[in-house]
Amino acid sequence: MQRLRDLNGLGPKSEAMLIEAGIDSIKTLRALGAIRAFIQVKETSLNKPSLNLLYALVGALEGAHWLTIAQSQKSELIMQLEGYDELKKIFEAEGIELKG
């Protein structure tokens, strides 16, 4: 069985943060996608992840190096995260909990 750390760009530290956030398999990571997985880690981890984890997650799922992702998709990924944060604020104002 392949471990999360076996994916390109993910190591033991990234794997530990993902598992701590309830993402314990590649299947779960693929189902969530990089953005939702990053948000779930961000919201549950004691050690707040940097954007490098997001780039690594995208790279792991796409089979690319995280530096390539950071250079080519950085703006798009940051806009997606900001959009999620805005949506979360709107839902919270309405008393609705938005989960990653």
Image (cartoon, helix red, strand yellow):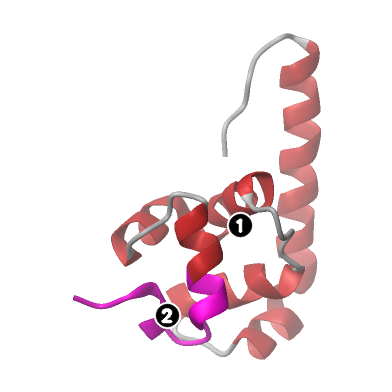
Q: Is residue 25 visible?
A: yes
> Can you tell which quarter of the image residue 79 is in?
bottom right
Residue at 44%, 84% in the rendered image = 63
Q: Which mark is residue 38?
A: 1
Say if 12 sits above or below 44 in the image: below
User: Quarter holding the N terminus?
Assistant: bottom left
Using the image as rendered, state which of residue 15 and residue 100 is in the foreground: 15
Judge left or right: residue 67 versus residue 90: left
Q: Earlier in the sequence, mark 2 or mark 1?
A: 2
Residue 9 highlighted magenta (yes or no):
yes
Q: Residues within 10 Å of mark 1 (few under 14, many from 20)?
A: many
Element marked by disc 1: helix
Residue at 57%, 39% in the rendered image = 100
Residue 57 highlighted magenta (yes or no):
no
The span picked out in magenta is 1-15
Judge left or right: residue 73 versus residue 27: right
Q: How far apart are the alpha carbons under marks 2 and 1?
A: 15 Å
Q: Is residue 59 visible?
A: no
Say if 84 sits above or below 19 in the image: above
Using the image as rendered, state which of residue 93 and residue 11 is in the foreground: 11
Using the image as rendered, state which of residue 23 and residue 94 is in the foreground: 23
| Residue farthest to the left, as pictured | 1
Q: Which mark is residue 5?
A: 2
Residue at 32%, 62% in the rendered image = 25
Residue 46 on image: x %, y %: 69, 53
